[in-house]
Image (tube, rainbow, N blue to C red):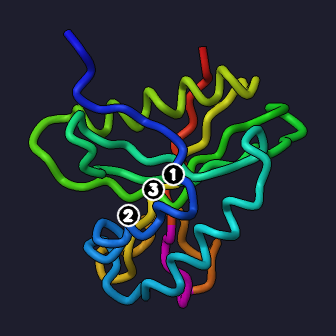
Amino acid sequence: MQDLFNAAPLPPAQARLAYPLVQMFDPAVTLDAWLAHARRIARRKPDHGGMIAVRDNRGILHAVFTYSVERDFRRGACLRIADLIVGRLPGALVNGAVLGAAQDLARRIGCKTILIDVPTLPESTRPLDVALEGMPPLDYAPAVVVFERQAS
């Protein structure tokens, strides 16, 4: 069976196509700000960073994320997935396509670890757990959750 979704680099000339998805995630992001961000990301060499779009077989965009390669003194080369925006569909196929794309990218670039920043908006965050009491100042709120997986 052919995959329902495919992931490929999103060139800056096509970044406008992802804007409706971006705006659904955060209506405060302007088109100009989004396009400027896409141009900054596009300046990176593909083995150092870029932007990936996940589309269905009809070409409809369902997810977008940026990636960068970071060096960690413990892990070595890490692939960091950020600016992750995933449209909501029933099931886990889109999420699976994003994770598969990250795994393929890590393998191709030579990263042994994948770090995924999952963005949250301030109105959707909860107070920090009591276990973290006193560590961050009270005016800080979680901005991302990082999941780590060893690339195979």
Q: Secondary structure at mark 2?
A: helix
The residue that mark 3 highlights is: 84
The residue depicted at 47 percent of the width and 64 percent of the height is: 15
Dot 1 crowding, Cα within 10 Å, few <14, some 14–19, many 20+: many
Q: Earlier in the sequence, mark 2 or mark 3?
A: 2
- Tell me what residue is drawn at x 60 percent, y 13 percent: 152
Tell me the number on the disc at residue 48. none
Residue at the spot of label 2: 18
Pick whichever, 72 or 7, lies toward us.
Answer: 7
Residue 116 located within the stretch drawn in magenta: no
- Between label 2 and label 3, give the one nearer the viewer: 2
User: Element under label 1?
Assistant: loop
Query: Which range of residues does the magenta coloring cover?
Result: 138-143
First in sequence: mark 3 vs mark 1: 1
Tell me the residue at 32%/53% (across/down).
Answer: 86
Q: Which mark is residue 10?
A: 1
Residue 125 in view? no
Q: Is residue 86 left or right of residue 119?
A: left
Mark before the other along the chain sequence, 2 or 1? 1
Q: Is residue 33 above or below residue 11?
A: below
Which quadrant of the structure image shows residue 7?
top left
Query: In x, y percent, where is residue 51?
Result: 57, 52
Q: Determine contact: label 2, label 1, CB under 8 Å.
A: yes
Residue type, mark 1 in image: Leu
